[in-house]
Amino acid sequence: MEAIAPTTRVVQGPSLRQRLAARGFDAVTLLVVPAAVFSLLLFVYPFAFGFILSFEPKNGGWLANYQRFFSDSYLYDTIANTLLLSVPVTLLNLLFAVPVSFRVRLMRRQRLLTTILVLPITLGTVLVAEGLLNYLGPQGWFNRTLVALGLIDQPLRLVHNYWGVFASLVITGFPFTFLLTLSYVTGIDPALEQAAATLGASAWQRFVHVYLPLLMPGFAITFCLSFVQAFSVFPSAVLLGEPAGSTRVISIAAYQAAFEEYDYSMASAVAMIMGFVQLAIVVLVLASRGLFYRGPASGAKG
Amino acid sequence: MIRDTTLGAKLWAAAVWSLVGFFVINLLAMIGTVITSSFATRWLGTWLPLGWTTRWYSSAWSEFQLWDVLIVTFQVAGLVVLLSGALGVTAAYALARREFAGKRLLVLLFLLPLLIPPITFGIPLATVLYRTGLAGTFWGVVVANLVPTVPFVILVMIPFIEQIDPKIEAAARVFGANTFKLFIHVLLPLLLPGILAALLLVLVRTIAMFELTFLVAGPTSQTLVVALYYAVFAAGVRAVQSIDAMAVVYMATTLVWLVIALRFVNPTQIVTRAKQQPAH
Amino acid sequence: MTIALSQFGEVRLDRVSREFGALNALRDVSLTIQRREFIALLGPSGCGKSTTLNCIAGLLPVTGGAIWLDKNRIDTLRPEERGFGMVFQNYALFPHLNVRQNIGFGLKMRGMPKAEIDRKVNEALGLVRLQGQENKLPGQLSGGQQQRVAIARAIVIEPPLVLMDEPLSNLDAKLRLEMRAEIRRIHNELGATTIYVTHDQDEALSLADRIVVLRDGVVRQVGTPKELYEAPAHLDVAEFMGFRNRLKGTVVSVENGRALLDVEGSRISGVARENLSVGSTAYAAIRPDDLVLGEAGGNALKVKVDTIEYRGREFVGTAHSEGGLDFVFRSHQPVDLGSTVHLQADDQRVLVFAEPIKGRR
């Protein structure tokens, strides 16, 4: 938007205040400054600080932390361990969330279900880990029911291993994935499906040719957010898994570096690697999103 | 979705509902286990405990110094609510009402702490806070918790403020309201439902925020959820029931606020921060 | 009647400009509004009429010129210091306040004692005929009732000037006519001074004492409704006043205020409204009402009929000429579609304008 210079008469130029106001900077805009300064100071600055710190190791050259991480299997295995947990869990959650949200969308009273599902998100991973320790334990109700039903003879070992962490990630992750998916699914104009039906598309065809292309971007974002949450699993990996073995996830490595070895430089390096792996997966998913339809999902109203 | 009445569609619906049922039953049973155990005298190898008691609550109360922990928890949460409300609502107002260069960048800046998991940015944040000596203190915990809650308030409030017609503010001005009166008589009453909802959710999130508090808290600045973690971590030192009693106290403190918050927001919005209902 | 509006002489806009940031810039708008006048600011969307109103109200700062209330310069005052009453397009009623609180808002801001606020609000309620609704919230009112609340809220503060920004645009056609009469009645009863923004020329013609036609941020013409209706000064004003037929031609001769045009080979004569030079391009503007079926020769053009609509008392048709000019005309008898007829206009009812200067946008 360019201002038209007055030509008919000589005027002194607009004051600085007017020029700033024309660009949207005035007293009201300044209200954003405290929050922005806060975020810069306590979010951006620590990240930058940690990034630089990770190249200033206690011993060795500037890359020593990263060299150590990628040469020590006890450290670099944490990436694989975390991915082995987070990728299957996220896929499973998304796979279940999609049909469920299509079904729940039809419900007139969704609120009870969504309220129940929001419980594990609100309670958090520590409580879920605590609860699952008992519930999935050899004497817990879960194993007891399976034995009583005659499905198994011996209680399954479900805690202090991979499956305990897996279960906790499903309990907290599924509701998160589901609620996100539900918001995307309900965002699609039902008239589109009705239109497809009048044109002769079956339920499956309607899903594949109408819903799926429209929902793909939403699913991609849901996957990213759910994955990032799962990848940063921490308390349940310690409490419900075997933190020295199969569920030694990358956040445990970062925590130990910082609070057991007091090597903040190494801890920052691990945190940066953790952030980088998350970023890499997110970029990968969102880049493939470019292959799909992007635009309004509500028909002409957009 | 168009309702289908073929057999296949019915089977499919049944399968989906069983899935949901299985999940909900396990979830409730898990919570039920904790509650049952917290009232159990002895519970080993049976469906239900041998007897019932409430003594674990009093023992948990004294063993874990729950009174002190609860006070710290509510002091932290209260301060986080007040500060993130003050910082967040003002910033949201500016972002909702003005277009300016760099606005998109700023929104991204506020979006990132919500998208990046706390453990990822918590380690560098804790490092900085330890360098400044803030970590381990009460204020360190407050400051760390503000990092995601300020953006949360901003992003919840922006659509809420946007749906208030700026002409209403113009009308208040024309009819003689100065900035202060405009805020007191017009903006505050209109924004109150949104502010209340946002701040209640901040309260719940802060009580339940494990990672950031865990990374920066010292022995005297622990919140309930961190104390619970340490108790579970050191399981075997205390009776299981005692830990479960503490877990129930934690659930109660969280869920009371969640129930109140759900009077103002849809559960879906806790995750998606979608548009709020109109203010009138 | 104790709602007594402040006494003053005139409001004067002195070369008001608004040129930064806003899309609808204003350029050198000068205008004097006398006490008790009803002024309509008329123009298409984006012409700057709402910008003018917002500058007067103080909601937009002016970037040049000054606004005077008698001897006091007011464009430097904040909106809350000007004390004008304003009716907004979507009414902008406070959704959390009931009718009584909405109307009393301005008085409360002025720190008036509660008893006096109540008395004045009651009176305003009576004036806009809303007794019995005072405890409802705006959301519970119909569009017309909300409109009445907005008007009551604006006049109860006894402002020197009442500003109205397209107040009827959200009402349906019937209610619009009703509220139009109400606005004029209240204006007269109070002896108010009103500036009224609208894009609807019927509204402006029927309500206003004087109309200001704006286009591209510039005042095009100021005059009484009769002056504007009968003697628009420019082609764009004429089009806005219902001269829907615009016949492009070449000036053949100009004398005694009359111009003769060559339009597609036919001679059209009319009243010259601007300076015309022989041989230049010019436009003949004719209202559909004045374009009727006639004979070849006398101020007529040959056209082919495209559509014909029955309108009760008469027919309204559209047609096009061989040269591609479009016409809207009136007829007392039905005309066959596709038939070729001659359309004729009384040369007193034809206005001739010079070609508009391009490149203002």
Image (cartoon, rainbow, N blue to C red):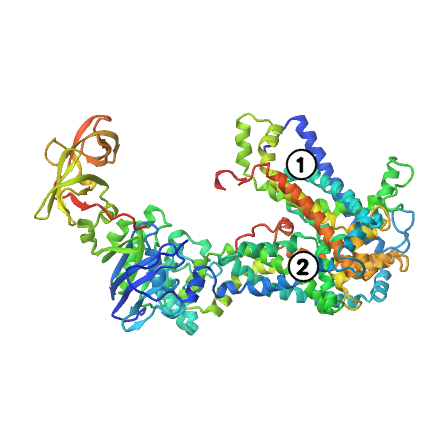
Give the residue at x 86% y 59%.
B242
| Dot 1 crowding, Cα within 10 Å, few <14, some 14–19, many 20+ | many
Which of the 4 image quadrants contains residue C115?
A: bottom left
| Dot 2 crowding, Cα within 10 Å, few <14, some 14–19, many 20+ | few
Q: Is residue C316 left or right of residue A284?
A: left
SS class of the residue under badge 2? helix
Residue C233, image x, y percentages: 19, 51
The residue pinned by badge 2 equals A48
Residue B280 visible in the shown view:
no
- On residue C137, the disc is none
Q: Chain of mark 2?
A: A
The Cα–Cα distance between marks 1 and 2, rounded to whole angstroms, is 42 Å
The residue pinned by badge 1 equals A99
* Badge 1 and badge 2 in a common chain: yes
Q: Amino acid at mark 1?
A: Pro
Between A58 and A194, which is closer to the camera in this rendering? A58
Of the 4 image quadrants, the one containing the N terminus of chain B is top right
Q: Is residue A301 left or right of residue C214?
A: right
Q: Is residue C1 left or right of residue A284?
A: left
Q: Amino acid at mark 2?
A: Ala
